[in-house]
Structure formats: C-alpha cells, structure tokens
Image (spheres, rainbow, N blue to C red):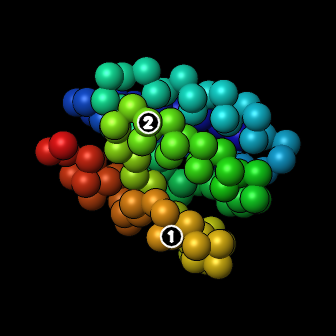
C-alpha cells in the first residue's frame, strides 16, 4: 500500500495505491489516523489506484470516518473503480460514505461547512 498526500486549501487529499487488505490494514489505519489532526478535518480519499479491498480495508475506512465525524469534520471518497464499487454496494458502505466520481467533485463536496 502506497500513500501520497496533497493539501488543496483546507482539504487534505489522500491517494492510496495497491491493496487495502489484512496485510496493509494496520499501516493504513495508523497513517490515516495521523490525518485527523486539523481542528475540523476535511479529507478526500482517492481510491482510483486501489485494486483490491478486503473487509479489513473497509474497517480501516470506517474507522477513519468515525474519527473524522468525532472531530466534526467531513470525509469523501472518490475515484472508486467498478470492481471496488461493487464491494461497497454489497457491503452497504455506499450508504455510509459520501462517494464522488472525481477529485474536483470531492473537493467541492467538502467546501462550505
């Protein structure tokens, strides 16, 4: 699992690449938790280069969502590939997360709060 971060105004964009599974979940959890340091975090997670996600990976994202919510922040996922999107739909995570198709719409969804 590779991570890249970019700041666009008050929005932190996190780009994940690789597999988000049991092998990478703990490292991903620790790395993503470090992002919830802003007073009111606004985080957009780019999943366009995530080729596989397991239940452990879904739990990592759910944990991030909880931390962001506890800080009165906002989290948006974007760029989800069709095969990953199917996993989100089957698990019901598409109802839990705000999901946008691309970077621009994710940033727009995080503004104005």
Residue 73 pos. (x, y %) = 34, 38
SS of the residue under disc 2: helix
Name the secondary structure under disc 1: helix
Vertical side of 87 occupied by 71: above or below: above
Residue at the left extreme of this rendering: 112
Mark 2, Cα crowd under 10 Å, few <14 / some 14-19 / many 20+, is few
Q: Closer to us: mark 1 or mark 2? A: 2
Task: Please tell me which residue is depicted at 66% across the width and 55% down the height of the picture.
Answer: 58
Residue matched to label 2: 70
Task: Spot the residue most to the front.
Answer: 70
Q: For residue 89, what is the image quadrant?
A: bottom right
Residue beneath the point at 75% across and 59% down: 55
Reading the image, the residue beneath label 1 is 94
Q: Is residue 55 left or right of residue 68?
A: right
Residue at (60%, 43%) from the top-left corner?
63
Quadrant containing the C terminus in the rendered view: top left
Q: Nearer the viewer, residue 84 or 33?
A: 33
Q: Is residue 12 visible?
A: no
Local crowd size for mark 1, using a 10 Å CA cut-off: few (<14), some (14–19), many (≥20):
some
Q: In screen coordinates, is 111 left or right of 2?
A: left
């Amino acid at each position: 699992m590779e991570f890249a971060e970019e700041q666009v105004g008050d929005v932190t964009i996190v780009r994940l690449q690789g597999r988000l599974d049991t092998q990478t979940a703990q490292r991903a959890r620790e790395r993503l938790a470090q992002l919830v340091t802003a007073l009111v975090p606004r985080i957009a997670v780019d999943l366009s280069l995530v080729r596989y996600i397991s239940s452990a990976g879904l739990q990592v994202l759910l944990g991030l969502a909880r931390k962001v919510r506890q800080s009165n922040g906002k989290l948006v996922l974007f760029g989800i590939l069709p095969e990953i999107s199917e996993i989100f739909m089957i698990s019901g995570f598409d109802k839990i997360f705000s999901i946008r198709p691309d970077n621009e719409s994710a940033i727009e969804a995080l503004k104005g709060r």
